């Protein structure tokens, strides 16, 4: 049996007629940049997240960069984030001219270890970016208390966490702003690059919109130099169509994750965990195994596609050698980078495929 890591075509086929109608509507109206389809999606996604404002941008990296810049983060500032994430998180910080400061991850949830943040706080610290990694919410109660006490901005990196919740409240509501990616493989994915910033701060939303649109609100009225990062009408229409299905897809992901846990319990495999009261969105189903690379090769030989997210902790990358970090400065993230293995998970995966993956995984670790 062959089990792909993700099957975007299966999702497309399930809603093909609606997607085609959405695309045709945009094309027939020439609503390619701005317009009602972008406005409609921004309104609907803000409501989905439980916030007042959504600003569509070109991608998730730009969402982080624009949000930080709108908050006034720049040269001379420091921004704290977690040592295990995709480079977009830290890259967006340095794009503002600020210095990225890494903190190790929690050994159970893989999100930022809030206990370590105080060790790296300085009078130059301006913001914290927790990452809801793999779809698992970070400990936002602790982070909000800490950011409030030390007068820091809190920006959620929710690129992998569409629909994740904490005590019933969706991520995106807990910080000054939250940033989402709609890269095609995400839980809510476009058919190209796209992203969004959500916030309850009207002034911040306006500033984000200006920065992302060449520093303007009106066509030639530029209050500042900005960048060109806009959600286009085609992607907005596609995302708006798919948003109607996101709750159901998220529940499917959770049921699939439960099935994995059932069939992989009582093994040496370390299964995903969440904080009390949190609900995982399972963008990825990440386990930890000894001799990960050998296990992965055995799965590949049996027709099971897997992923590794991520094989090198951020501070250990060549890109950050100038910061002078050592792998032992981040023992948890460094060790986990050689153990994490992402198993196939997507709403359309069949129960027999999940069981097959589990059977092969169990035999591969013996």
Image (cartoon, grey):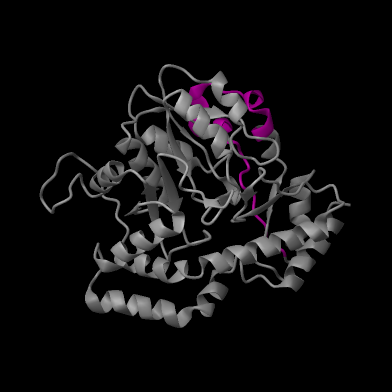
Q: Residue at x 61, y 23 (%)?
A: 326
- Part of the protein shown in magenta: 304-333
Point out the image quarter for the N terminus: bottom right
Q: From this viewpoint, which residue is outermost toward the left?
A: 220
In this rendering, the answer to whether 158 lies above or below 250 is: above
Please indicate whether residue 244 sits to the left or right of residue 338 in the image: left
In this rendering, the answer to whether 238 lies above or below 230 is: below
Q: Residue at x 58, y 63 (%)?
A: 250
How many marks do you count on the picture?
Answer: 0
**Coordinates of residue 225 in the picture (x, y in percent):** 19, 40
Residue 3 in sight? yes
Residue 345 in sight? no
Please say whether residue 319 is one of the residues in the magenta stretch: yes
Please indicate whether residue 183 sits to the left or right of residue 6 in the image: left
Q: Using the rendered view, name the quadrant where residue 27 is placed.
A: bottom left
Please indicate whether residue 77 sits to the left or right of residue 163 in the image: left
**Coordinates of residue 64 in the picture (x, y in percent):** 40, 43
Q: Residue at x 61, y 26 (%)?
A: 115
**Coordinates of residue 138 in the picture (x, y in percent):** 58, 41
């Amino acid at each position: 049996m062959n089990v792909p890591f993700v099957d975007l075509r299966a999702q497309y086929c399930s809603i093909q007629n609606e997607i085609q109608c959405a695309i045709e509507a945009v094309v027939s109206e020439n609503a390619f940049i701005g317009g009602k389809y972008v406005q409609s999606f921004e309104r609907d996604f803000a409501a989905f997240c439980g916030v007042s404002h959504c600003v569509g941008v070109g991608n998730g990296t730009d969402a982080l960069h624009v949000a930080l810049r709108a908050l006034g983060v720049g040269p001379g500032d420091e921004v704290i984030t977690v040592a295990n994430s995709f480079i977009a998180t830290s890259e967006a910080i340095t794009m503002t001219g600020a210095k990225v400061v890494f903190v190790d991850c929690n050994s159970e949830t893989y999100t930022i270890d809030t206990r370590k943040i105080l060790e790296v706080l300085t009078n130059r610290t301006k913001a914290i970016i927790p990452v809801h990694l793999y779809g698992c919410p970070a400990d936002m109660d602790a982070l909000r208390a800490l950011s409030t006490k030390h007068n820091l901005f809190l920006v959620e990196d929710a690129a992998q966490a569409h629909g994740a919740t904490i005590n019933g409240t969706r991520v995106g509501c807990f910080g000054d702003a939250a940033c989402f990616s709609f890269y095609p493989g995400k839980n809510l994915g476009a058919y190209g690059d796209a992203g969004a910033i959500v916030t309850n701060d009207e002034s911040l939303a306006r500033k984000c919109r200006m920065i992302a649109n060449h520093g303007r609100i009106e066509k030639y009225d530029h209050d500042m130099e900005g960048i060109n990062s806009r959600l286009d009408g085609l992607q907005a229409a596609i995302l708006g169509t798919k948003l109607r299905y996101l709750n159901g897809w998220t529940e499917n992901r959770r049921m699939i994750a439960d099935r994995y846990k059932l069939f992989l319990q009582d093994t040496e495999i370390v299964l995903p965990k969440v904080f009390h009261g949190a609900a995982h969105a399972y963008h990825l189903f990440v386990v930890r195994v000894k001799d990960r690379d050998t296990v992965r090769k055995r799965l590949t030989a049996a027709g099971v596609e897997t992923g590794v997210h991520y094989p090198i902790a951020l501070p250990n990358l060549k890109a950050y050698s100038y910061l002078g970090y050592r792998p032992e400065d981040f023992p948890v993230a460094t060790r986990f980078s050689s153990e994490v293995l992402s198993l196939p998970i997507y709403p359309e995966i069949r129960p027999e495929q999940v069981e097959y993956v589990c059977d092969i995984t169990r035999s591969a670790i013996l």
